[in-house]
Image (cartoon, grey):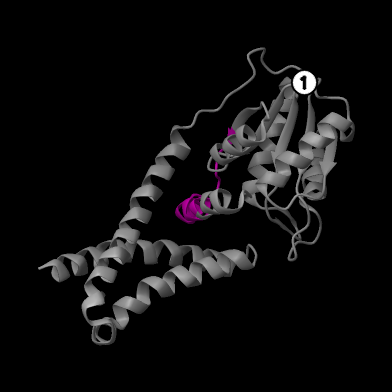
Amino acid sequence: MADRVFSRLYRIFGAFVFVSFASYFLKLVISSEGTLPWVATTTVMAAVAFPYVFRRKLREILKKAYLPLKGVWVCGMIFYTVTWMCLVGYIYLAPSRVPDGGLDGNVYIVFGAKVNSDGPTKTLAARLECVAELLRDDSEGIVIVSGGKGPDEPTTEAECMRDYLISLGVSPERIIMEREAHNTRENIEYSVKLIDKAGLSDRNIVCVSSDTHIPRIKLMCERAGVDAYYVKSETPEKVYLFTTWVREYLSYVKMLVMGG
């Protein structure tokens, strides 16, 4: 009886876990994001598929230990599914937070994303167009574009972002480049250092990024003791939204384990 129940649950929740990471794997084929996502996706897919494909052989080898281990594995997949759904809800229920005094002389931090040889991706362009609109209403505002150079990027994300903002009509004098960060934690840490160095620490900090990214930025700012406000830009490529949620889940796991 227990074996049949576990088998049904395995097929239901195992299918969801496998499809989640398989979809992210396909996204990586189209647009690579480094080594760690490849390792994570292939490991999870193998961990889900292997026990199912070789279940008869495993039953022979493990004998009495097979059923308890199967139960533990099923619980793990249920845990992923439930926490993934909770995370998606958290992402979209987290509100933006704007300065009480309105848009007046703030420092905006735009968080980088992958750039291509022909310019920013649609996701990064949406972030930049959002901050360009904010700067039009904030004549004294300064923007920090934060992002280093990945191994498969033609230039630093900061330089690409600066050029795109200039094309949108933002004055170069209002743009500060942070060209060393390679993750969200470094985006915050290095940008705050530039704010202090530029003598802008008395101004409000406003973080600008994608709607799926902002809740994690908020958590990291709070952990770092950075008092900030947050403005979301919409995710333009809705076809990749599901894979973005999977990516964010892995990012939260990484943040909890490694702090980055």
User: Residue 161: where, in percent of width, then height?
Assistant: 77, 45
Q: Is residue 140 magenta?
A: no
Q: What is the count of numbered marks?
A: 1
Q: Residue at 67% of width from left, 30% of height from top? A: 225
Residue found at the very far top of the displayed protein? 101
Judge whether residue 185 can be spotted in this image: yes
Label 1's element?
Answer: loop
Residue type (three-letter) at the residue carrying disc 1: Arg
Label 1, on which residue? 203
* 65 vs 199: above or below: below
User: Which range is magenta?
Assistant: 232-249
**In screen coordinates, is 49 left or right of 233?**
left
- Vertically, is 42 above or below 128? below
Q: Is residue 238 within the magenta segment?
A: yes
- Quick one: which residue is furthest to the left in this view? 1
Determine which quarter of the picture holds residue 210.
top right
Q: Give the quarter of the figure containing the N terminus.
A: bottom left
Image position of 213 (left or right of 195): left
Image spot of residue 5 (x, y percent) = 16, 65
For this orientation, the residue located farthest to the front is 64
Q: Residue 73 occupies which quadrant of the picture?
A: bottom left
Looking at the picture, how far across and down is residue 187, in whole percent? 72, 43
- Quarter of the rendering containing residue 10: bottom left
Where residue 237 appears, as percent x and y from the top left, is 54, 50
Q: Determine the residue positioned at 57% across, 64% down.
A: 37
Residue at 57% x, 37% y is 219
Q: Is residue 168 visible?
A: no
**Does the magenta stretch mainly form a helix, a strand or a loop?**
helix
**Front-most of residues 118 and 134:** 134
User: For the residue carrying disc 1, how many other residues have a C-alpha within 10 Å: few (<14), some (14-19), or many (20+)?
Assistant: some
Q: Relative to the observer, which residue lies in front, 238 or 196?
A: 196
